[in-house]
Amino acid sequence: MTQTGSVIPHSRPTLGEAEAQALRSVMASGQVAQGPQVDAFERAVAALTGLGGGVAVSSGTVALEVALLTLGVGPGDEVLLPTYVCAAPWLAVTRVGATPKLVDIEPQSYGIDPTAVRKALSPRTRAVIVPHLFGLPADLTALQAYGVPLIEDCAQTLGAVERGRPVGSVGRVTICSFYATKLVCAGEGGMLLSNDERLLEKGRALREYDESDRLDSLAFNRKLTDLQAALGLVQVGRFPELVRRRAAIAALYGAELSSLGLTLPAVPDGRTHVYYRYVVRVPESAGPLDGIVKRLEGRGVQCRRPVFRPIHQYLGETGFAASDEAHARALSLPIYPSLTDDEAARVVHALREEFQ
Ligand SMILES: Cc1ncc(COP(=O)(O)O)c(C=O)c1O
């Protein structure tokens, strides 16, 4: 193994002097809790997604919970969601007292499978959570046709397009995450977005416990701070530059890794990819993924399973072949705007050593 220098991390935020300056000015202003920066951040993210407005909250998981509550989802209701995703959507559905119903994914796009959704629909289905995984939109056109409210989960994908429509602009409610290594970093944070002002009004009420005319047991403290929002605002301003850099790294990987027997990310017709993650499929002949991850780390590159574990595997459920296959073979490579050309070349070198 030919490792030089330190290990290239799988994820890393991309922060600079503009972000530091924004934080200093909020500190100097004396207003660090939710205030004008949060208002401006809500307007900026709404503009980025082409939506009427947003309600900033403390995380993407909380945004999912609030989105479900604003739709009136609760005990007795079913919500469909893919099993191949982090635990956050399942937790949010469970938290509001509704029943999560897992469905499989499309093998190539990793998006929730519209055919599986159709088969899982029942008179109790109140919503479908649609994560756009790794930077690629799910098949919104097919999902929209069922007439069930969609909650678009844009935690991993902003700025991508499905048949001319930006992700986030199709669902009844949309959520984002601003976790440290997401496309837009605020350290932690989330937002729900919608064109429906009444939903947004409900969301605003749910993130506060104070200054309300009535005591609502569902309300809580779910607020974002002006410090986080100021950071996020700078990142939204840099969004085109940040996405361009991701695209450049993806193009380099596409050219340099094409002869190694890996299946490179596919972009279905009518969709664009913003490469939040660069996920390849390794052939079965390469052996178990855990060993590959360990050897690549020894070669100086930290790669990861892009989803830690599909939800059905925690629950001991079976019958999700595409998700099981993705879990066994999908490998996520380092891709983020602060990845240097030299680091990207080291990633390519390590993969060549492993797979050639
Ligand atoms: C698809 C998806 N949904 C929701 C979340 C939850 O976001 P947060 O970590 O901000 O709570 C994440 C975060 O990793 C995610 O990837």
Image (cartoon, grey):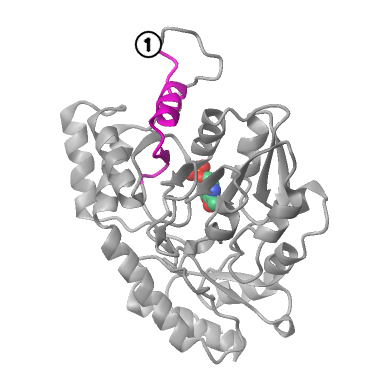
Three-letter amino acid code at disc 1? Glu
Q: Residue at x 32, y 46 (%)?
A: 45
Badge 1 element: loop
- Relative placement, left or right, of 313 versus 258 is right
Q: Residue at x 56, y 88 (%)?
A: 353
Q: What is the quadrant of residue 290 in the picture?
A: bottom right
* Residues shaded magenta: 186-210
Locate the N terminus and report the quarter of the image it occupies. Answer: bottom right
- Residue 199 highlighted magenta (yes or no): yes
For label 1, count other residues whose C-alpha is less than 10 Å away and answer few (under 14), some (14-19) or many (20+): few
Q: Position of residue 59 (x, y in %)?
A: 47, 39
Closer to the camera, 184 or 31?
A: 184
| Residue 109 in view of the camera | yes
Above-or-below relation of 309 to 46:
below
- Relative placement, left or right, of 159 versus 106 is left
Above-or-below relation of 72 to 92:
above
Locate the C terminus and report the quarter of the image it occupies. Answer: bottom right
Q: Position of residue 272 (x, y in %)?
A: 43, 69
Q: Residue at x 50, y 74 (%)?
A: 269
- Residue 23 highlighted magenta (yes or no): no
Q: Residue at x 45, y 65 (%)?
A: 163
Q: Is mark 1 within 8 Å of ligand 1?
A: no
Q: Position of residue 286 (x, y in %)?
A: 70, 83
Q: What is the quadrant of residue 322 in the picture?
A: bottom right
- Relative placement, left or right, of 344 versus 10 is left
Q: Which residue is mark 1?
A: 211
